[in-house]
Amino acid sequence: MADTCSMDFLTVPTATFGLLYVLVILSHERREIVHLNVTSSPNADWIAQQIAEAFPYDTPRFLLRDNDKKYGHAVKDRIKSMGIEDVTTAFRSPWQNPYCERVIGSIRRECLDHVIVMNEKHLRRVLSGYVDNYHGSRTHQSLNNDCPTMHCSSLGYPCCHAVLGAFWETTRTITKADNCTSRWLRRPWKTSFLAV
């Protein structure tokens, strides 16, 4: 698991009825989002460039992906030239890429289902705030209720901070053992359709 990453796309509709594509690259070891980028027209050259940006120094041994037509020869050549073993799932089998599908579902449920996206820049800003919170505050049972980047300090008291411009508040109890637990609190009186 330490040398395995996976990638997948999610689609996001905009307020002007456009469609944006988000590429998510996830490391399986700590469930860390290694790379996330947005485009309105994904092609093989763009995806190959994103793979190079995601792994500038250390490359994983395996990269798990689906059999989408967007992954053309440029992507396969880039993966091979970086010394990564390309692992593709069977057709119409999203359960074979469970970690990435789970993260995409979390992004949708916890963030994108509550925001009307205006454009590409707005989506990048919203996802940047979500990824910061995901890495620093969101706990995972598979990591013994720790955060992906292990930045939990040992303050020993609960703290609360706003996420996505006060759209969400997260309460984090920090214990002496450097484990943090977070709980999402929905504040209906702070709900707006545009995250600041």
Image (cartoon, rainbow, N blue to C red):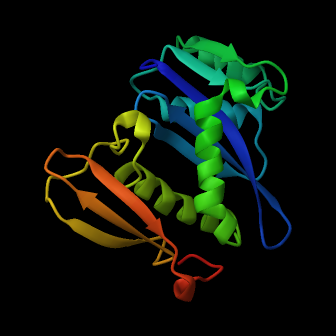
Outermost residue toward the bottom in this view: 189
State whether residue 46 appears in this view: yes
Left or right position of 165 against 8: left
Question: Image height check: is 12 above or below 193?
Answer: above
Nearer to the camera, 86 or 105? 105
Q: Image quarter for residue 108?
A: bottom right
Provide residue 185's location: percent of width, then percent of height: 47, 71
Question: Image height check: is 17 above or below 75?
Answer: below
Provide residue 151's location: percent of width, then percent of height: 26, 48
Q: Image quarter for residue 150?
A: top left
Give me the residue at 42% from left, 40% from top: 141
Give me the residue at 40% from left, 22% from top: 58
Nearer to the camera, 42 or 139? 139
Left or right position of 45 against 57: right
Nearer to the camera, 191 or 84? 191
Give me the residue at 46% from left, 36% from top: 31
Q: Image quarter for residue 63?
A: top right
Left or right position of 49 against 44: left
